[in-house]
Amino acid sequence: MNENMPVLSRDAGASWLMIIDMQRIFGEPVSEWSTPGYESASAGIQRLLGAFSSRVCLTRFLPPEPPTGVWIAYYEKWPFALDPLNAHLYELSEEFASVPATIVDRTTFGKWDAETDRALGYPGEVVLGGVTTDCCVLSTALAAADAGVHVTVAADACAGVTGEDHQRALDAMALYSPLIDVAQVDSILASLGK
């Protein structure tokens, strides 16, 4: 992380906050996909919310019906994720359920595509927070950067499957600078004048 350079490189007032997959399936300890550090990531995201007013996007990872291709093997490994009795786990966590936001639902790890770009009004810049750093956040960041969108990953508003995986994903994304930058919430808020 290079904290000496501006965190948001474009028109900070037009950037969007994308909150990746803050759902019960990743936040509840009883879930097989429970993410250590979820509460800490949530706290970081809560700090960012007010700085983006109506430019907030919440994403949800949803299971395909039915899985195809390699996703078949993936859900054979995680059968609980397709069990209708667990459908409620795909709901947003309580602290995000009533946040006014653009909602993006995808059956893929990455949440950035042409439809997302259009739904957000073709932003030049997004700030990412959420779970997991080493899966859905990483996949979203790379796709957005490939599409020409500057990405700032809020390191302390994300959580990985493990602390080590979280750091490895942050380190990998930092290699993409200046397309992707990794920063702390305090630096992002400062660059927004908050």
Image (cartoon, rainbow, N blue to C red):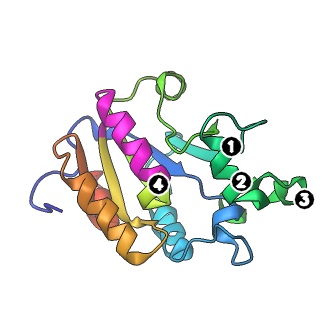
Magenta stretch holds residue 146: yes
Residue hosting label 1:
72
Q: In which quarter of the image is the N terminus?
A: bottom left
Expressed as whole percent of the image width and height from the top left, the position of residue 175 reads 18, 51
Q: Main secondary structure of the magenta part?
A: helix
Q: Please provide percent x and percent y for residue 53.
A: 50, 45
Q: In the structure shown, which secondary structural element does the residue marked by tag 3 occupy?
A: helix
Q: Compared with residue 90, is residue 115 higher up or lower down, i.e. above or below?
A: above
Q: How far apart are marks 4 and 2 (CA)?
A: 18 Å
Q: How far apart are marks 3 and 1 (CA)?
A: 19 Å
Q: Which residue is disc 2 drawn over?
A: 76
The first of marks 4 and 2 along the sequence is 2
| 88 on left or right of 150 | right
Q: For the residues labelled 1 and 2, say whether their Cβ atoms are less than 8 Å apart.
A: yes
Q: As shown in the figure, which amino acid type bears the numbered disc 4?
A: Cys
Picture coordinates of residue 141, whole percent (x, y) = 37, 44
Q: What amino acid is found at the position of numbered circle 2 in the picture?
A: Glu
Calculate the distance from the C-alpha at mark 1 to the C-alpha at mark 2: 6 Å
- Quadrant position of residue 169: bottom left
Q: Quadrant of residue 5?
A: bottom left
Q: What stretch is highlighted in magenta?
A: 136-150
Q: Earlier in the sequence, mark 3 or mark 1?
A: 1
Label 3, on which residue?
85
Amino acid type, residue under disc 3 in the picture: Leu
Q: Distance between the residues labelled 1 and 4?
A: 18 Å
